Image: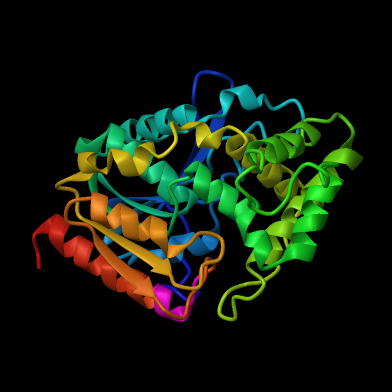
């Protein structure tokens, strides 16, 4: 998706979390602008140089960070020695708050996409006084029904790819497309998580390839997106992404089921814009719609020509929403 011109960070660092993890962060844009934190998806995708271009660098002090064990954070999840027990939603929320304090920021705008929406919601509901506004794209809350849809329900559209995804885990006789008696999908995801902990790099690599092939199948019909994007990564990034994703989603995102929508009333008074693609097969528009109804004052923008990976229209709407939020935050509207 096109954005603002390419920029480089003016400051970078590794935040010591105190438990052996080092979280990479960087700042770019206007040092005196409205602080804005980019919360990347995945979980485990890491932040990209392109994400720096998602907000106006003249208006915002743009902060990016790689969540634990991915991107430039260390240890990297592609290394079997990285301890996933130290990577949960609770840990990530503590990292975000520690980073805010380290940078001397009182309040910041949160800009999240996909899993980044889930993490942003969890942070804002825990620390509403630290959030000046929220710009959320491709809305997820990581409820069980959303995870079940992504890793099973979408198989109704791609039955061949889904059968291969399940078959590789040796669970073809156990898992079927949704029925009233279907077992919880967490068992399938736990099987992949277990494979991603195998000391044999061959096992981990094959499991990662099968997982990513499924992710690519789900976005394959998005004409304005980037089909094949999940598999088109360096090998270490693939291993980290799948290890972290399977770890989180086999544990329901380390969140009580449905809590983020159930407690969205905590966000009252925080200006927020939710932007979601109508053709998003990874996560239906119902989550964005339900969240907008539960969050007092939230604005919902539905993009008719976009899926999960976005479109030019979604980028344009993101920039317009960021400007509206900037004016609300600064009182300049």
Q: Residue at x 71, y 68 (%)?
A: 228
Residue 60 figure quarter: bottom left
> Front-most of 279 and 160?
160
Q: Residue at x 57, y 74 (%)?
A: 225
> Front-most of 138 and 321?
138
- Left or right of 54: which side holds 307? right
- Left or right of 63: which side holds 309? right
Q: Position of residue 69 (x, y in %)?
A: 62, 36
Q: Position of residue 201 (x, y in %)?
A: 88, 38
Q: Which residues are magenta?
A: 310-315
Q: Position of residue 37 (x, y in %)?
A: 37, 49
Q: Is residue 328 magenta?
A: no
Q: Residue at x 78, y 53 (%)?
A: 165
Q: Residue at x 19, y 54 (%)?
A: 271
Examine the rendering and report whether any part of residue 107 can be seen: no
Name the main secondary structure of what is drawn in magenta. helix
Q: Coloring scheme of the render? A: rainbow
Residue at the extreme top of the image, as rendered: 19
Examine the rendering and report whether any part of residue 91 can be seen: yes
Q: Is residue 290 above or below residue 158?
A: above
| Count of labels in the image | 0
- Left or right of 160: which side holds 60? left
Residue 149 figure quarter: bottom right
Quadrant position of the C terminus in the picture: bottom left
């Amino acid at each position: 998706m096109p954005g603002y011109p390419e920029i480089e960070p003016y400051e970078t660092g590794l935040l010591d979390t105190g438990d052996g993890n080092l979280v990479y962060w960087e700042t770019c844009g206007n040092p005196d602008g409205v602080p804005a934190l980019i919360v990347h998806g995945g979980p485990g995708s890491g932040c990209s140089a392109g994400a720096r271009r998602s907000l106006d660098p003249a208006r915002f002090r743009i902060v990016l960070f790689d969540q634990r064990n991915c991107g430039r954070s260390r240890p990297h999840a592609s290394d079997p020695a990285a301890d996933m027990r130290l990577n949960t939603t609770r840990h990530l929320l503590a990292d975000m708050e520690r980073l805010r304090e380290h940078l001397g920021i009182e309040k910041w705008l949160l800009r999240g996409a996909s899993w980044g929406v889930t993490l942003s919601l969890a942070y804002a509901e825990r620390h509403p006084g630290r959030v000046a506004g929220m710009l959320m794209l491709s809305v997820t809350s990581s409820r069980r029904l959303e995870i079940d849809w992504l890793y099973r329900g979408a198989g109704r559209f791609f039955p061949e790819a889904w059968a291969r995804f399940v078959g590789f885990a040796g669970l073809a006789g156990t898992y079927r497309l949704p029925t009233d008696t279907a077992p919880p999908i967490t068992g399938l995801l736990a099987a992949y998580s277990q494979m991603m902990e195998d000391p044999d790099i061959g096992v981990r690599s094959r499991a990662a390839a099968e997982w990513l092939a499924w992710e690519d199948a789900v976005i394959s019909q998005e004409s304005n997106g980037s089909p094949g994007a999940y598999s088109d990564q360096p090998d270490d990034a693939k291993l980290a992404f799948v290890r972290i994703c399977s770890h989180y989603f086999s544990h329901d995102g380390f969140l009580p089921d449905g809590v983020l929508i159930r407690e969205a009333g905590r966000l009252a008074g925080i200006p927020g814009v939710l932007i979601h693609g109508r053709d998003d097969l990874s996560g239906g528009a119902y989550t964005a719609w339900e969240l907008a109804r539960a969050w007092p004052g939230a604005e919902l923008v539905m993009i008719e020509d976009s899926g999960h990976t976005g479109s030019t229209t979604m980028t344009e709407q993101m920039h317009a929403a960021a400007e509206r939020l900037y004016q609300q935050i600064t009182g300049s509207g």
